Image: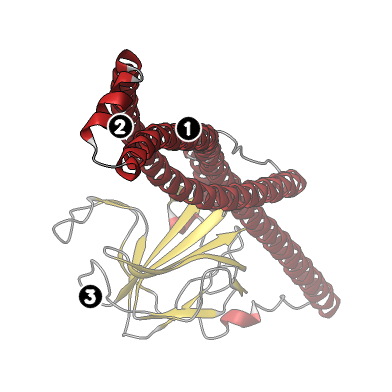
């Protein structure tokens, strides 16, 4: 039993060293429970932190989505502005061409008018006199004079008209230039805003990645705390099992003490009655059908209904390949199924099957004594059962490494095999 507890504690300690650096082996239930609660609080805190980080990521992602919408709208606006700027520049180019054409026409009209004026100025009234001699009537002369006047008026009118056209075109060009400047200003503002939005998106995406990195680290820490909680729960389970085993051992010790006290009282009473009646004290009633089943000086009784000892304790020639030349107990032969008795009251330490021992039982008794029963055909007890002296615990058989139906019986003190003859 103590070996089992030692193995459990050693396994737990080994596990604690293999797990995360947060984990440490708790020496008692209170410490393990406190550590579990501490790790649970840490786990709750890290889960809250993760929730906060995830909410922050969601908020930033929504913000970035809105920025993406703005960026798309700004891109569309820039596309429209670029089209408008191109159209305005094309209009300005056309207007400039019209203005240049108007200037050319104006200059030509101006030059033609200057030539006619110069001609009339140089010829003066002589041109009229010449025209007077060339015409046949006064009416024709007056017509010629009126024609000259109208030419002058036409030249003046056309010059004014061309100047007005040129001014209108120049004004249109100026308006177009102002509109182009306004469009360019808006275009610059939109491009600046777009660049700001793009920079903000980069910053926010970096923040999102940082939050996600923090979430990954927190998830790893969460897993560590969860492992620690599971580890402390295993320790608590092991400590609980240890407490139950210790309680069972205590109950077994108390039961054993009670049995011994009852046996002592019964023996004292029998001795007193025998002395009073001047007759020998009766033998142990548990061994009425066993010729030598009464308690020995060690308190053990003969362990089976047969007394046919076929092999004593000590050196011998191994009867089978694989068997030892040293015999650690005594062999008692008998028919298959012959009852096997508990040599003393105690707890069933082990009950099961093993290759060489076959079906076997190990009982633990007071005084660090153990009794062993091997090669049984069947077992009537299980590990942890409490048995009383003389109780049938199995039937004789030939399981395991055996040459025939028999009981191999051993006595061990502090785990060391002894000659059973000294105790029976």
Is residue 6 in view? no
Give x and y (percent) for residue 168. Answer: 48, 37
Q: Residues within 10 Å of mark 1 (few under 14, many from 20)?
A: some
Which residue is labeled 1 in the image?
167
Which element carries disc 1, helix, strand or loop?
helix
Image height check: is 86 above or below 409? above
Query: Which residue is at the front of the view, 204 or 233?
Result: 204
In the displayed structure image, the side of residue 105 where residue 373 appears, left or right = right
Give x and y (percent) for residue 377. Answer: 34, 80
Is residue 265 in view? yes
Taking the spot 76% from the left edge, 45% from the top edge, the residue there is: 34
Snapshot quadrant of residue 346: bottom right
Query: Which residue is at the front of the view, 304 or 369?
Result: 369
Q: Determine contact: label 3, label 2, CB under 8 Å.
A: no
Taking the spot 34% from the left edge, 45% from the top edge, the residue there is: 139
Query: Which residue is at the front of the view, 96 or 289?
Result: 96
Mark 3 and mark 2: Cα distance apart in space: 141 Å
Snapshot quadrant of residue 375: bottom left
Which residue is labeled 2 in the image?
105
In the displayed structure image, the side of residue 216 where residue 87 appears, left or right = left
Q: Determine contact: label 3, label 1, CB under 8 Å.
A: no
Q: How crowded is mark 3: few (under 14 residues within 10 Å), some or many (20 or more)?
A: some
Which residue is labeled 3 in the image?
404
Give x and y (percent) for residue 352. Answer: 40, 70
Q: Nearer the viewer, mark 3 or mark 1?
A: 1
Which element carries disc 2, helix, strand or loop?
helix
Colouring used for the render: secondary structure
- Pointer 3 or 2: first along the chain: 2
């Amino acid at each position: 039993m103590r070996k089992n507890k030692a193995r459990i504690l050693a396994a737990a300690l080994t596990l604690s060293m293999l797990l995360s650096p947060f984990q440490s082996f708790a020496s008692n239930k209170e410490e393990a429970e406190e550590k579990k609660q501490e790790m649970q609080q840490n786990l709750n805190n890290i889960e809250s932190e993760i929730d906060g980080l995830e909410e922050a990521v969601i908020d930033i992602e929504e913000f970035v989505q809105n920025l993406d919408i703005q960026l798309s709208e700004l891109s569309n606006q820039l596309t429209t502005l670029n089209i408008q700027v191109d159209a305005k520049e094309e209009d300005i180019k056309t207007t400039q061409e019209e203005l240049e054409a108007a200037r050319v026409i104006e200059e030509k009209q101006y030059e033609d008018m200057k030539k006619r004026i110069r001609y009339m100025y140089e010829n003066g009234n002589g041109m009229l006199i010449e025209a007077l001699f060339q015409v046949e009537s006064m009416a024709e002369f007056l017509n010629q004079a009126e024609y000259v006047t109208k030419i002058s008026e036409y030249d003046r009118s056309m010059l004014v008209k061309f100047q007005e056209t040129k001014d209108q075109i120049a004004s249109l060009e100026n308006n177009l230039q102002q509109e182009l400047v306004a469009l360019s200003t808006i275009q610059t503002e939109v491009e600046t805003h777009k660049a700001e939005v793009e920079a903000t998106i980069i910053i926010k995406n970096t923040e999102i990645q940082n939050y996600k990195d923090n979430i990954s680290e927190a998830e790893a820490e969460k897993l560590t705390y969860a492992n620690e909680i599971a580890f402390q729960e295993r320790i608590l389970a092991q400590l609980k099992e240890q407490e139950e085993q210790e309680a069972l051992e205590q109950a077994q010790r108390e039961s054993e003490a009670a049995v011994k006290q009852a046996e002592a009282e019964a023996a004292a009473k029998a001795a007193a009655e025998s002395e009073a009646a001047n007759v020998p004290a009766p033998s142990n009633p548990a061994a009425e059908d066993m010729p030598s089943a009464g308690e020995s000086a060690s308190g053990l009784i003969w362990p089976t209904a047969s007394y046919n000892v076929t092999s004593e304790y000590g050196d011998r020639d191994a009867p089978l390949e694989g068997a030892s030349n040293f015999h650690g107990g005594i062999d008692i032969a008998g028919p298959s199924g012959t009852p096997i008795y508990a040599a003393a009251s105690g707890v069933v330490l082990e009950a099961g099957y093993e290759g060489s021992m076959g079906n076997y039982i190990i009982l633990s008794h007071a005084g660090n004594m153990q009794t062993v029963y091997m090669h049984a055909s069947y077992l009537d007890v299980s590990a942890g059962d409490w048995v009383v002296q003389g109780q049938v615990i199995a039937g004789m058989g030939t399981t395991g490494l055996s040459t025939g139906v028999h009981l191999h019986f051993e006595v061990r003190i502090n785990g060391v095999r002894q000659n059973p003859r000294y105790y029976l």
